[in-house]
Image (cartoon, helix red, strand yellow):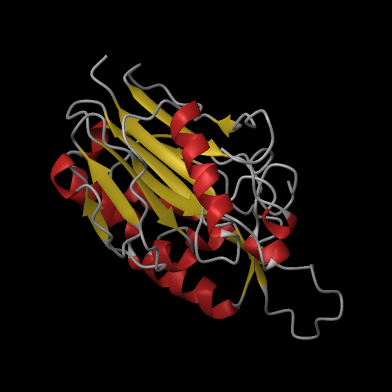
Amino acid sequence: MSKGSQAPIIQTIKPNWQVADTVHACVTVRTTGYSEGDFGHCNLANGVGDSSQNVQMNRQLLNEQLALPESPRWMNQVHGNDVVEWSRANVGEIVSADGCWTSQTDVVCTIMTADCLPVFFYHTVEQSIAVCHAGWKGLLTGVIENTINSMTSSPEYITAWLGPAIGPENFEVGPEIKEQFCAQTKDASSCFIPSQLNDDSKTHDRYLADIYGLAKLRLKAAGVKNISGGEFCTFDDNKQFYSYRRDGVTGRMANIIWRTES
C-alpha cells in the first residue's frame, strides 16, 4: 500500500439470512478505500473511469481484510443470463456472464453492482453457493432461473438473500418493460405503479418498478421458498452505495460469497 501510513478499514454489509457458519457473504460499501472523486472511496471495478492503481489497491485491501481464501473471481458482466461454474480448475479464467456458482470450498464467487440487484443463494443440502447480477434485463431473460438450474435440481432447499439495489420509489421504467414482465410473470403488475417523479409528464406512461418484488415472484415461481433481504435503496443512500442511475459516473460495490470447510 502506498497511500497514507495506515490502511483504510473496508466496510461491508452482511446478509440477514439463516445459513451454515461455513457460508460467508457480504456486500462492500463505498465509505472507505483509495478511490477519489466520483469513485470515492471503495470502487472495485475496472473500466468505469477510476484509476487502475486505486482499484487494485482496493482489491488488495479487500482480500487482506476479509481474509479471503483466494482473490474474488471477477466477471465481465453484460446484463445477460449466462451463469458460470467456478472451481479451482478454472482459476484466473475471464468470462462474460452475470451469475456464478460453485460447490467447492474456498472459491470466491463475486458480482459487482451499482443499482442492479445482487441475489445470493445457498443450497442447504448440496452445500452449493451462488450469486447473480439481476438488473431488469437479466431478470427478464432468466438470470435467476438459470442460476438456480445451474446449481441444483432441488430449489426447495435454497436460501436466497436480496442485496442492495435501487428501491421501488426511484426505479422509473417505460411501459414496454412493464408489459414484458407482465407477459412472463404472474402478478408482476403488482410490482409497477404509475410514476410521479416527473411533474411535467403529460403522457403519464412511466412506472416505478419494484425490482425486489419482481425478483421474489420469480424466485418463488422457480421453487425457492426461503427468501429475505430487499430493504435497501442504492439510489437514496449515497453515503453507502454507488448508484449509476443517480450519478452516471460512479464506482461499483462487490457482492461476495464463499464457503469454508469449518
Q: Residue at x 67, y 38 (%)?
A: 32
- Is residue 249 visible in the rendered image? The answer is yes
Q: Residue at x 45, y 26 (%)?
A: 17
On screen, 5 above or below 239?
Answer: above
On screen, 189 above or below 160?
Answer: below
Q: Is residue 43 left or right of residue 128?
A: right
Q: Nearer the viewer, residue 172 or 24?
A: 24
Q: Nearer the viewer, residue 212 or 112?
A: 112
On screen, 18 above or below 239?
Answer: above
The tally of labels here is 0
Considering the image in quadrants, where does the C terminus appear? top left
Q: Percent from the top left, x then y, of residue 252?
A: 56, 54
Find residue 202 and report its image quarter.
bottom right
Find residue 260 and report its image quarter.
top left
Considering the image in quadrants, where does the N terminus appear? top right
Find residue 196 and report its image quarter.
bottom right
Q: Percent from the top left, x then y, of residue 246?
A: 72, 62
Q: Is residue 68 left or right of residue 44?
A: left
